[in-house]
Image (spheres, grey):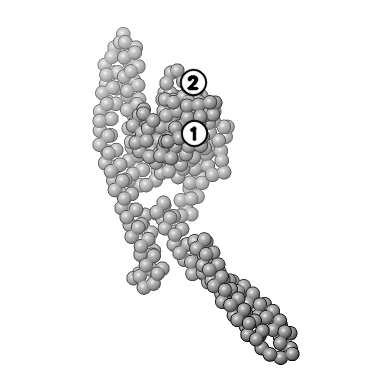
Amino acid sequence: MRNFRTRLVLSTVLLVGAVMVGVVLVLRVALELTEGEQRKYASDHVFYTMLVMAAVTVALVGVVAWVTTRRVLDPVRQMAERAEEWSARDLGHRFALGAPVDEFAQLGQTLDHLLDRVAQAIRDEQRLTSELAHELRTPLTAIQGSAEIALFRLGADADRELRDDLAEIATAAARMSDTITTLLELARRGTVAGSSSLYEVPPALEVLVPPHVRFSADLAAGLPQVAAPTELVVRALAPLIDNAGRHASSAVTLTARRTEGGVELVVRDDGAGVPAALQATLFEPGTTAGEGTGLGLGISRRIARSLGGDVTLARHGDGNGRETEFVLRLPVSGQAASSRSAS
C-alpha cells in the first residue's frame, strides 16, 4: 500500500514538475525574443521568479497528493487488516457494506465472499476431523478395555514381559484416546481451553527416542504454564522428537526458555541435517526424506497454530557439528486469555 502511494505521489510530482519546467522554458524563450534595453534584466528576473514558483507549486502538489492518497487508501489498509484478523480469530465477521456502489463497497463485497469461502473450508475441515476422531475413539476404547481385562486375567506367575506389553498397550490406548478427545474438542470449538506445566512433558516424549540415542531435557527454571493441555503439547512435540530420534547420530535434546512472546521449546539433534531440497516444503503433507509418511511435521505445525503458536525450522544442520533445530512456540496462559478478551 505504501509503495503504491509513493509511486502515485512521485508520478504526480514528476508530471507537475515537467509541466512547470516547460512553462518556464517557453517563457524564457519568449523573453529572449523581446526587444528593449531592459530585456536581459527582465528576462532573468521573470525566469527566477517562475523557477521559485514552480518549485513551490511542485512541493505543494506533492504534499496534497500524499495527504489525499493517504486518506483515500487508509480504508483499504484497514479492511485488509480486519479481514486478516477475522479469518484467524472469528469466522463470523463480515464488512457488510451493502451494494457495490463504489470501489470500496465492491472491495468489501469481494472480501466478504473470500471470508465466506475461507470459513466454509475451515468448517469442512473441522467436520472431517470431528468425524475421524469420533470413529477412532470406539476401537481405541475397545483396545484399552481388552488390554486391561487381559492384565486382570493374568495370574501372578504370568510372564513379566507379557504383562509389561499389555500394560504398555493399555497406557498408549488411553493416552491416544485422551488426545483424540482433545482434538475432537478443538475441531468443534476451534480453540482448546486449559493450561499445563511444561515440566510434565519430557517423560511422555522419552519413549519416542530409539535406545541407541541419548535423550536429555533441559527446561529453564520458573517457566510459566502454557495455554494448552499437556496432551496437545506432547502431541505437537512428538513428531519433532520422533523426527530427531530417527535422524540423530547420538543425541536428542529438548530445551525450553521464556521469551517475550511466550515460551519456546527447542528440539535439537546431531544428525546429517535437513536436505536443501526439502527445506522449503518441509511442513507440507507428504514431504519426507524416505522414512515415514511425511505427515508428522505438518500435524505438529497445525496443532501449534491451533493453540496460538507455531513450529519452525531454526537451523537445518550440515552433518559437520552444526545441529538441526526445530522450535515450537506456545503462548503462556495469561497472554492467551488477554488475547481472547481483547478480540
Q: Do the residues labelled 1 and 2 touch (CB within 8 Å)?
A: no
State whether residue 201 appears in this view: no
The three-letter amino acid code for the residue at tag 1 is His
Q: Are there few (<14), some (14-19), or many (20+) residues within 10 Å of tag 2?
A: some
Task: Give 315 or 41, whichever is nearer the viewer.
Answer: 41
Element class at badge 1? strand
Element class at badge 2? loop
- Compared with 290, 182 (above or below) is below
The three-letter amino acid code for the residue at tag 2 is Ser
Q: Which residue occupies 48% across, 46% down?
A: 336
- Compared with 336, 38 (above or below) is below
Q: Which residue occupies 36% across, 57% down?
A: 115
Q: Which residue occupies 32% across, 55% down?
A: 117
Indicate left or right for 261 with 35 as reference. Answer: left
Indicate left or right for 156 with 88 as reference. Answer: left
Say the numbered circle drawn on residue 316: 1
State whether residue 73 appears in this view: yes
Judging by the rendered image, the residue that carries numbered circle 2 is: 250
Quadrant of the rendered structure where residue 17 is? bottom right
Q: Which residue occupies 41% across, 28% down?
A: 242
- Residue 120: x and y in percent read 31, 53
